[in-house]
């Protein structure tokens, strides 16, 4: 009787637990693809295949297929008829939609954070600016990967201080969809000799240091609008050139 009870107990436990190994692989594949999209490692309109990603990630096709399904649901990728997927192309409508949403959501997050950030938290983001200055002082080839990482770390250090568990996932989703556009903009800024992003980040830090929510929101809007406005002008100029050729 006791042995039977043990068996029933084990069966009950097994029914409540998911296989750890398989879940872990799926989550790791999803998180890695998510990181790549936020960092802009995939270009707009780039086509991705399940087999190609599986080979690159050294895993089977099943976790890749499931991860891609999640990313399609999150609007970070688009399904194609041939069972491959692509990064959404850059269009004026998509950029305007993403920027409008980011201004609303991230603007609210930084306004909330402005009244909550401690001097220690402000010093953390100030140290990120110092790291940015060190990168620029090297005067080596533009390190886009590091710049993207620093930019993300800077913003999310602030957003996490907003005190809202609802806003953070929304912001992450917007960054997931914006990543490819932002990377294209960074390259375009470099070619055009545009003002460094750290200039805009210093305005944000200055506003946060004195807990000025309105100024922090204004500085953030200027920062996140810049790449979208630059790309919009670039697309419009290219379209006009094609129209006259």
Image: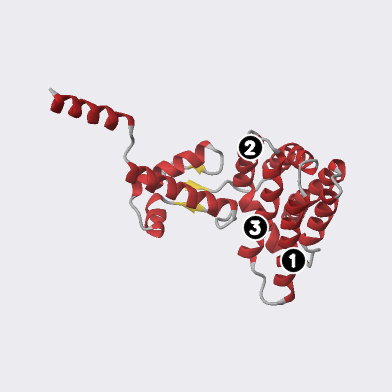
Disc 3 or disc 1, which is closer to the eye?
A: 1
* Percent of width and height locating residue 221: 80, 46
Disc 1 or disc 2, which is closer to the eye?
A: 1
* Percent of width and height locating residue 60: 33, 51
Numbered badge on residue 183: 3
Where is mark 2, residue-wise? Answer: 170
Where is mark 1, residue-wise? Answer: 130
Q: Earlier in the sequence, mark 1 or mark 2?
A: 1
| Outermost front residue | 2
- Name the residue at 75% across, 62% down: 129
Residue nearest the viewer, comparing 231 with 11:
11
Q: Which class describes the residues within 10 Å of circle 3: few (<14), some (14-19), or many (20+)?
A: many
Evaluate whether residue 193 shows in this view. yes
Secondary structure at numbered mark 1: helix
- Name the residue at 81% across, 58% down: 202
Residue nearest the viewer, comparing 101 with 172:
172
């Amino acid at each position: 009787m006791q042995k039977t009870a043990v068996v029933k107990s084990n069966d009950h436990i097994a029914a409540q637990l998911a296989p750890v190994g398989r879940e872990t692989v799926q989550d790791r594949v999803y998180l890695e693809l998510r990181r790549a999209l936020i960092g802009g490692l995939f270009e707009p309109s780039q086509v991705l295949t399940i087999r190609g990603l599986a080979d690159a990630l050294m895993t089977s096709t099943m976790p890749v297929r499931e991860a891609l399904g999640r990313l399609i649901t999150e609007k970070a990728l688009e399904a194609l008829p041939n069972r491959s997927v692509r990064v959404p192309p850059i269009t004026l409508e998509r950029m305007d939609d993403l920027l409008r949403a980011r201004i609303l959501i991230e603007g609210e997050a930084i306004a909330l954070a402005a009244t909550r950030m401690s001097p220690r938290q402000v010093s953390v983001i100030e140290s990120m600016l110092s790291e940015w200055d060190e990168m620029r002082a090297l005067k080596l080839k533009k390190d886009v990967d590091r710049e993207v990482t620093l930019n993300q770390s800077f913003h999310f250090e602030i957003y996490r201080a907003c005190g809202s568990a609802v806003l953070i996932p929304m912001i992450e989703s917007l960054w997931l969809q914006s990543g490819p556009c932002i990377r294209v903009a960074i390259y375009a800024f470099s070619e055009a000799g545009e003002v460094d992003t750290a200039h805009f980040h210093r305005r944000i830090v200055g506003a946060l240091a004195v807990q000025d929510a309105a100024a922090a929101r204004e500085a953030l809007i200027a920062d996140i609008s810049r790449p979208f406005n630059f790309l919009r002008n670039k697309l419009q100029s290219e379209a006009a050139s094609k129209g006259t050729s």
